[in-house]
Image (spheres, coloured by chain):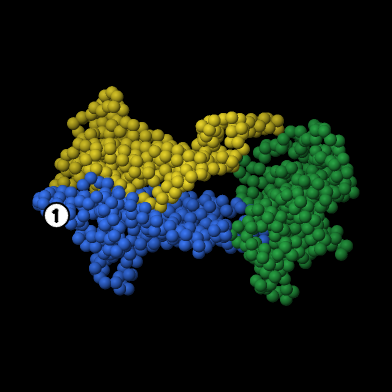
Chain colours: A blue, B green, C yellow
């Protein structure tokens, strides 16, 4: 078991190197560079900059170097831990990202917990009461939940809140806490705000997960071991929780592998629409301005979180399923 | 003693079970009656789909939706010789849970899938013992988990599982088919039931292991004086195991009687056809084995009257008009056929 | 009586016994009423995709700043009990405080409309010209806004027709590409096995552990700004399908691996069938229906992805119109409070995704006729 985890961990650096290379290639792909975009922005605002100055800046940033040298420079800055300098903000990328990363992860994890807390009981109820009114209602909610893009739901909620209740539901803090230092009151304020974006982010996943749970559990409920357990004289609800639910959990745990990463990258859209502190909007801006080291750094963090999510699900699955544990 | 020997342990009276499917109603069991005496091995034979397993599940009310017991009684004589009708008990109530596993145990058809793959077999057997924890001590003290584990190891030894201390912590998929079935028997026997329902316990395992399992069941029956209902489509197994035989076709009892009478003096055309289609050791070789003509009808299209009449070689005019009732044709032998009695089953 | 029952029952059984796989799928699919209704809806939707101009009432690009944010003009079919379709007229009044035009429905004034009537000229599939439209105002100079107008005074109804064309086509083409990639690579992986299989498997794993949305964004940001809408459209489609094929690839591989061991494949091989024939005639038909069901469930995912990308400004770009592009107009909450009908394109997305999912689920259930 430990060997299995170590093997997976050993693969991680290799994967990160592959990703960093691919990401850098994508970052380099657009024609022009940060300075071309910068000049265009300046021009649109009426000011200009001389060609000599641009050339000097280009040399300073190393943008005139060949691809592989630039990649090397970036790797060096990554290994040093500062992830290079943001061309736009003129600050170390690690600071820019660090400011937002904590809340990005907090939002995704909060949404994850919320998803499971809703999807699992709903799925169990639906499977044990098939074709009941509640089951039908949940099915309808699930279909609509899956069909509604995150940003649509965010827009609708924001519009309803603004137009009918005259409140703004953007951001993660009340105005007085935005720049306040961390305190218990600030954490409570965060908790009071985070659940709405968390629901928006998790609604499609909740719908999918509860449908997976329902389908799995319906399958498991027809297995002979359920009859065996019933024939032992077990109480029905205890039996359902102990055997079929336990088995229906395995495929659900394997969804963590794609669901957690989906939450991380999905928070990008929700955060952009709802104006949340998150690395998503930062990435969007960096991409548009061709601030390539910042964008590259954020993409690398997304990749890292994705691999971590997959790893987590594999380890959890091995822990709860003896069939996998023994084989490994 | 003599009185209790004469009174049946279990008495199924005119049992009907139907499944309300989208396309119609399937009457899986259609008026079945038989008795099980204490310590007796009752064999139930019939083609697949004849309602054997459904009848057995109905006894413990284990029929899944949309199946339902629509009619009949399942009278069970409890330990204090009080008789209750299992068909009237709420399927999820405490009274029935007490009987399930405690007084009537089930050996299911598929040992492969009948254990949960993510719990150890020992864990599942210990659980069965703990569910009936108060049955073990005369003073009503509940049995502890440690004691239950000891009992399980003892059971494993009884059913012939070697290295029981290790095997108890194995998962079912780590055991061979034979061991799995032995573990299943150990679980069924864990609470010393007075009636054991064995639903084709040897179908899924190879012939050698099959013989061992049969011998084991025989031995255990003698040791604990457990009554066994033995379901199979294998006439050879019936001849070896049972003392009394019930022959079923399409959810109805065609004939029943002591094993010797059924095998040597079958009175119902269906039993006769069934026996003819069995290869004998001393029969002539190189001649085609006689088969029962026609095919089992589709469940939605039950023939009216006697269910066997479309395939019966001795069919008469009245066979398609009315259903014959089960009437005595020998000392302990009964058959439902108009060849032997004109009585009509009115219900 | 009993004989009669027997024969009809037997006839039904025979009917099932000789029916082809596709017929069984169709019988089972037909029983899902919701899926059938959704299928009909999707057919209508794709007629819109083929002929958006027929449904549009105006040129989707026609702007008029004086006619910004006109509210929805509901169609009324009857006038005084007689069939005479009309929409209520709109009257504008400038708000003296905000200096903004505020529009009011004036039901007393009726703007007559006709069905299947002449309007602006358009080309049918680029082949021949016509001026027939589903709905047209009786007075050709009158503009009608069935679903309101946006901040530039463009007619949202007509824009939605064209946006639907783009978004639904992206979804369909992206899935088609994914299916081709998935079947070819998954098939090779499963049938050839060995080193090839290993390489393709690692590739799939690599692609599946990519953070999809950020990478999509980065790839679309990498598209040259000066590309034409058509080029951007195809690039977005390719980008969407690059990751989409992996799931299907895995599935196809799994099926091939399982089927390779089946007796009927061995029998075909012993009978001297060529490799291509074994794959195409013996193996593919066994899981084709399954692939179709899976793909139909992939289309809505693609539609949502395209809409999200375009909404963020990194997908289809104006002047091309897609449902996501239309929703960009709804980004500002103040604007939305003023003109909530700008959310209607989102409704179109939700309903069509819902329909695709229902059809897909119905197909998936029907695709395995022997499961019951």
Percent position of residue A256, x then y: 45, 57
Tell me which residue sits at (19%, 33%) in the image: C142
Q: Which residue is mark 1?
A: A56
Circle 1 SS class: helix
- Total residue callouts: 1
Percent position of residue B159, x then y: 75, 61
Q: Is residue A182 above or below residue B235?
A: below
A287 or A109, nearer to the observer: A287
- Residue C65 visible in the shown view: yes
C288 or A76, nearer to the observer: A76
Percent position of residue B98, x then y: 68, 64
Tell me which residue sits at (34%, 37%) in the image: C169
Tell me which residue sits at (64%, 46%) in the image: B19
Instruction: Sort mark 1 into few (<14), some (14-19) or many (20+) by Cα contacts within 10 Å.
Output: few
C91 or B147, nearer to the observer: B147
- Residue C218 visible in the shown view: no
């Amino acid at each position: 078991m430990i060997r299995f985890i170590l093997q997976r961990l050993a693969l991680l650096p290799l994967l990160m190197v592959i990703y960093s290379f691919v990401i850098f290639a994508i970052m380099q792909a657009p024609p022009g560079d940060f300075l071309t975009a910068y000049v265009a922005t300046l021009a649109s605002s009426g000011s200009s900059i001389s060609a000599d100055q641009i050339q000097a800046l280009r040399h300073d940033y190393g943008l005139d170097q060949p691809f592989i040298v630039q990649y090397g420079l970036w790797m060096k800055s990554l290994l040093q831990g500062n992830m290079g300098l943001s061309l736009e903000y003129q600050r170390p990328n690690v600071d820019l990202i660090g400011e937002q990363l904590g809340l990005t992860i907090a939002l995704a994890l909060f949404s994850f917990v919320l998803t499971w807390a809703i999807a699992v009981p709903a799925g169990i109820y639906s499977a044990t009461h098939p074709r009941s009114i509640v089951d039908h209602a949940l099915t309808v909610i699930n279909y609509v939940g899956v069909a509604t893009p995150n940003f649509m739901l965010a827009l609708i909620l924001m519009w309803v809140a603004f137009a009918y209740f005259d409140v703004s539901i953007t951001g993660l803090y009340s105005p007085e806490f935005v720049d306040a230092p961390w305190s218990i009151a600030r954490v409570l304020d965060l908790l009071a705000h985070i659940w709405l974006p968390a629901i928006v982010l998790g609604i499609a996943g909740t719908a999918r997960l509860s449908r997976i749970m329902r389908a799995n559990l319906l399958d498991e409920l027809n297995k002979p071991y359920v009859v065996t357990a019933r024939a032992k004289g077990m109480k029905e609800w205890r039996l359902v929780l102990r055997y079929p639910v336990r088995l229906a959990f395995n495929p659900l745990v394997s969804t963590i592998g794609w669901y957690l990463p989906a939450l991380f990258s999905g928070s990008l859209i929700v955060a952009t629409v709802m104006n949340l502190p998150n690395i998503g909007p930062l990435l969007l801006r960096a991409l548009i301005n061709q601030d390539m080291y910042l964008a590259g750094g954020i993409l690398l963090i997304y990749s890292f979180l994705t691999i971590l999510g997959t790893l987590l699900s594999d380890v959890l699955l091995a822990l709860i399923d003896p069939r996998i544990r023994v084989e490994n | 003693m003599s009185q209790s020997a004469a009174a049946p342990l279990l008495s199924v009276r005119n049992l009907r079970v139907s499944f309300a499917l989208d396309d119609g109603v399937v009457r899986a069991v259609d008026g079945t009656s038989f008795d099980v005496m204490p310590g007796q091995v009752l064999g139930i034979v019939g083609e697949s789909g004849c309602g054997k397993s459904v009848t057995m599940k109905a006894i413990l009310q284990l029929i899944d939706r949309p199946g339902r017991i629509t009619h009949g009684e399942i009278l069970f004589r409890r330990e204090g010789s009080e008789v209750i009708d299992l068909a009237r008990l709420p399927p999820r109530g405490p009274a029935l849970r007490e009987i399930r596993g405690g007084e009537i145990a089930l050996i299911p058809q598929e040992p492969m899938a009948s254990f949960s793959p993510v719990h150890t077999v020992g864990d599942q057997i210990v659980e069965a013992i703990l569910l009936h924890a108060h049955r073990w001590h005369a003073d009503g003290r509940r049995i502890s988990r440690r004691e239950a584990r000891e009992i399980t190891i003892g059971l494993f030894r009884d059913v012939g599982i070697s290295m029981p201390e290790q095997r108890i912590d194995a998962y079912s998929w780590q055991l061979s088919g034979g061991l799995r079935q032995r573990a299943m028997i150990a679980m069924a026997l864990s609470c010393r039931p007075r009636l054991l329902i064995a639903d084709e316990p040897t179908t899924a395992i190879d012939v050698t292991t099959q013989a061992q399992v049969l011998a084991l069941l025989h031995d255990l029956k003698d040791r604990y004086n457990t009554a066994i209902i033995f379901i199979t489509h294998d006439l050879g197994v019936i001849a070896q195991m049972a003392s009394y035989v019930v022959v079923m076709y399409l959810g109805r009892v065609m004939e029943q009687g002591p094993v010797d009478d059924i095998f040597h003096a079958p009175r119902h055309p269906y039993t006769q056809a069934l026996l003819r289609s069995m290869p004998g050791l001393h029969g002539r070789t190189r001649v085609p084995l006689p088969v029962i003509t026609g095919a089992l009808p589709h469940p939605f299209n039950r023939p009216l009257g006697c269910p066997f009449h479309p395939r019966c070689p001795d069919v008469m005019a009245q066979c398609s008009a009315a259903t014959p009732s089960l009437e005595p044709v020998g000392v302990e032998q009964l058959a439902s056929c108009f060849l032997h009695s004109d009585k009509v089953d009115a219900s | 009586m009993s004989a009669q029952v027997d024969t009809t029952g037997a006839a039904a059984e025979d009917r099932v016994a000789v029916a082809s796989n596709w017929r069984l799928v169709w019988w089972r699919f037909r029983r899902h009423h919701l899926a059938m209704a959704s299928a009909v809806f999707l057919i209508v939707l794709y007629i819109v995709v083929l002929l958006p101009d027929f449904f549009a009432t105006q040129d989707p690009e026609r702007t008029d700043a004086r006619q910004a944010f006109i509210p929805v003009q509901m169609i009324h079919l009857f006038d005084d009990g007689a069939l005479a379709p009309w929409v209520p007229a709109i009257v504008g009044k400038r708000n003296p405080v905000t200096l903004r035009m505020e529009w009011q429905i004036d039901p007393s004034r009726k703007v007559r409309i006709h069905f299947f009537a002449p309007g602006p000229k358009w080309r049918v599939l680029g082949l021949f010209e016509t001026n027939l439209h589903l709905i047209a105002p009786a007075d050709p100079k009158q503009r009608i806004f069935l679903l309101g107008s946006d901040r530039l005074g463009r007619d949202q109804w007509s824009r939605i027709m064209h946006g639907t064309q783009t978004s639904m086509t992206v979804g369909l083409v992206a899935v088609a590409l994914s299916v081709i990639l998935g079947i070819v690579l998954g098939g090779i992986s499963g049938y050839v096995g060995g080193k090839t299989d290993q390489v393709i498997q690692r590739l799939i794993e690599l692609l599946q552990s990519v953070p999809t949305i950020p990478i999509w964004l980065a790839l679309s940001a990498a598209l040259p700004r000066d590309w034409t809408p058509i080029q951007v459209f195809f690039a977005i489609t390719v980008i969407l399908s690059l990751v989409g094929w992996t799931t299907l690839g895995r599935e196809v591989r799994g099926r091939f691996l399982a089927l390779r061991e089946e007796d009927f494949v061995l029998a075909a091989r012993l009978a001297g069938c060529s490799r291509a024939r074994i794959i195409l005639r013996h193996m593919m038909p066994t899981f084709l229906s399954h692939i179709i069901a899976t793909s139909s469930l992939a289309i809505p995912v693609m539609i949502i992805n395209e809409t999200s990308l375009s909404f963020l400004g990194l997908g289809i770009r104006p002047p091309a119109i897609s449902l996501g592009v239309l929703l960009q107009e709804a980004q500002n909450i103040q604007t939305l409070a003023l003109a909530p009908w700008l959310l209607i394109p989102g409704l179109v997305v939700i309903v069509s995704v819902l329909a695709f999912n229902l059809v897909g689920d119905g197909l998936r259930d029907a695709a395995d006729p022997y499961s019951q």
